[in-house]
Structures are given as structure tokens and as C-alpha cells.
């Protein structure tokens, strides 16, 4: 059985692309009392904005200009963040199309009360960005060139997420018209 996703041209075929490492960005901040929800932990919306900020920086770096959030494909919170935690959000461009990019984000926290322990994974997310020009119209973005087997895996998984996003959009549209 042939996987239709594997027939896409490899991104390395385009010499004007940038390697995955070029887009990597890390943002860090200490969570404070203003970030807390009613349950005494950091509000998910605060983390979502932090995720969007780091993803936007990675998308802008990779595309060489303005990039705007088109979709948050998935965000998963795996552990609560507390006041005083030092939170790091790591982002990179996983996949590029003609005008869009998928950015993967991994968020970890260094606990304020156990700073010598390994950082705790607290969230992962996949966001879609579109490169835009000064007039706000979409523009072509350069290809991303995976460098490692891990980057290749992320690229292929991003293609799967894109195929699912497009299929869902078509199915909803067909349902509305039918």
C-alpha cells in the first residue's frame, strides 16, 4: 500500500529553504500571581498566549517577515503550572506549504520549589501560521529543510495533521451544502 503523503517532494529539493534549526526559538518567563486562575494554578489562556507568542516568533524568523496565526491545530496541557515556576516555551517550524507553516511548541516548567529537578513537560501545541505582506495578503514562505530524523518525523506528522484539517473542512462544507 502506498502512502500518499510520502509521494510529496522532499523539502530539501528546494535550495532557497532554511534548515529547521534556523527557526528554533525559546521564550522564558516566571509565572506570577497575575497569571493565576480561580484554582490557584496558571490560567490556560496565559499559557496559550505564551505558546502563540513563541510560535509567532519562530514563524516570523523562518519566513523572514510577518506571519499571523491562522489556526491552533492542537494544544494539550499535561501538567499544571504554578506561581513562581520558570516556564520555557520551545518552538520550531515543522512543515511549510506555499504560504503556510506548522509550528510545533513544547512547554516545560522549572518548579520554583525544586529548581534542581529536571523541567516538567506541561504542554505541547501545533499552530498554523500564514506569511503576510505589508498589505495583509498572504505571501510565499520559503521551505523548511529537516535536518535530523526527528525533524523528518515532525515534517511527516505535520503533513498528516494538515491532511486531516483539510478533510475536516471539506466534510463540514459538504454537510452545510447538502
Image: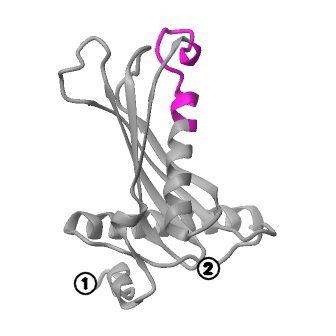
Which mark identifies residue 1?
Answer: 1
- Which one is nearer the viewer's eye here, 114 or 167? 114
Would you say 53 lies left or right of 17 here? right
Question: In the picture, which quadrant includes the C terminus?
Answer: bottom right
Q: Quadrant of residue 37?
A: top right
Would you say 152 lies left or right of 58 here? left
Per the image, label 2 sits on a secondary structure element best described as loop
- Which one is nearer the viewer's eye here, 3 or 141? 141
Residue 27: x %, y % from top left: 44, 41
Q: Residue tagged by mark 2?
A: 140
Determine whether label 1 and label 2 are within 8 Å by CB: no
How far, Cα to Cα, is label 1 from label 2? 33 Å
- Magenta residues (range): 34-49
**Residue sitting at 50 percent across and 16 percent down?**
32
**Residue sitting at 28 percent across and 11 percent down?**
113
Q: Is residue 127 above or below residue 169?
A: above
Residue 78: x %, y % from top left: 35, 31
Residue 107: x %, y % from top left: 38, 38
Numbered disc total: 2
- Which one is nearer the viewer's eye here, 112 or 8? 112
Q: Is residue 75 above or below residue 47?
A: below
Q: Is residue 25 above or below residue 172?
A: above
Per the image, label 1 sits on a secondary structure element best described as loop
Residue 40 lies in magenta, yes or no? yes
Residue 117 lies in magenta, yes or no? no
Q: Is residue 108 above or below residue 150?
A: above
Extreme right residue here?
Answer: 135
Specify few, some or many for label 2: CA neighbours under 10 Å numbering under 14, 14-19, or 20 or more: some
Amino acid at each position: 500500500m502506498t502512502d500518499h503523503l510520502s509521494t510529496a517532494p522532499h523539502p530539501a529539493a528546494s535550495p532557497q529553504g532554511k534548515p529547521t534549526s534556523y527557526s528554533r526559538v525559546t521564550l522564558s518567563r516566571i509565572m506570577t500571581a497575575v497569571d493565576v486562575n480561580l484554582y490557584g494554578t496558571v490560567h490556560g489562556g496565559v499559557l496559550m498566549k505564551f505558546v502563540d507568542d513563541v510560535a509567532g516568533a519562530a514563524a516570523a524568523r523562518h519566513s523572514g517577515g510577518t506571519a499571523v496565526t491562522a489556526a491552533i491545530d492542537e494544544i494539550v496541557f499535561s501538567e499544571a503550572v504554578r506561581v513562581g515556576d520558570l516556564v520555557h516555551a520551545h518552538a520550531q517550524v515543522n512543515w511549510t506549504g506555499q504560504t503556510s507553516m506548522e509550528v510545533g511548541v513544547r512547554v516545560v516548567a522549572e518548579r520554583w520549589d525544586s529548581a534542581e529537578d529536571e523541567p516538567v513537560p506541561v504542554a505541547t501545541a501545533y499552530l498554523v501560521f500564514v506569511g503576510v505582506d505589508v498589505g495583509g495578503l498572504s505571501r510565499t514562505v520559503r521551505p523548511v529543510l529537516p535536518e535530523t530524523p526527528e525533524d523528518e518525523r515532525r515534517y511527516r506528522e505535520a503533513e498528516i495533521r494538515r491532511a486531516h484539517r483539510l478533510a475536516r473542512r471539506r466534510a463540514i462544507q459538504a454537510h452545510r451544502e447538502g
